[in-house]
Amino acid sequence: QVQLVESGGGLVQAGGSLRLSCAASGRTFSSNHMGWFRQAPGKEREFAAAISKSGRTTYYADSVKGRFTISRDNAKNTVYLQMNSLKPEDTAVYYCAARPPGTGQVMSVMSYEYWGQGTQVTVSS
């Protein structure tokens, strides 16, 4: 069992930056691949970024590549999403999720077993 709590969301102007954090409970954090997803009003939840359990491999949606950076600190049971050059279209609720190794596809919502409650990110133009 993994419990996830996101923080760091807020209101920022276009071009600004935010850093999201996701704190995980439980001793199995380092055994899970981690991902960030986002969901805008009226839209489906979509993949943003993911990181392997070791932290050596990262994945990004085309829409955020070059602007967002995912990282993790297994000693602190925390995964981060650094978001730079934010755009109004980045406005969404951002969710942290955990995926056990060997299950599903990196970018698929259905592959992730544990989810946080989400944190709101609003980018004003």
Image (cartoon, rainbow, N blue to C red):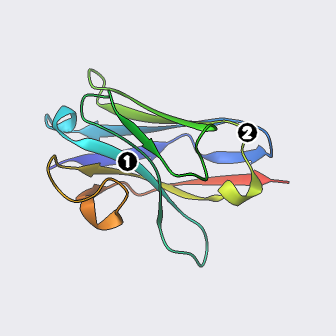
Q: CA distance from mark 2 to mark 1?
A: 20 Å
Residue positioned 31% across, 24% down in the render: 76
Residue positioned 61% across, 73% down in the render: 41
Q: Would you place residue 33 above or below residue 72 in this image?
A: below
Residue positioned 38% across, 35% down in the render: 79
Q: Position of residue 15 (x, y in %)?
A: 79, 40
In the image: residue 55, left or right of residue 119: left
Residue 28 occupies quadrant? top left
Which residue is more in the foreground, 67 or 26? 67
- Dot 1 falls on a residue whose secondary structure is strand
What kind of residue is marked 2? Ser
Question: Mark 1 packing: few (<14 Cα in 10 Å), some, or many (20+)?
Answer: many
Residue positioned 40% across, 57% down in the render: 117
Q: Position of residue 94 (x, y in %)?
A: 51, 54
Circle nearer the N terminus (2, 1) = 1
Total marks drawn? 2
Q: Would you place residue 36 above or below residue 91 in this image?
A: above
Residue farthest to the front? 62
Q: Which residue is mark 1?
A: 35
Label drawn at residue 85: 2
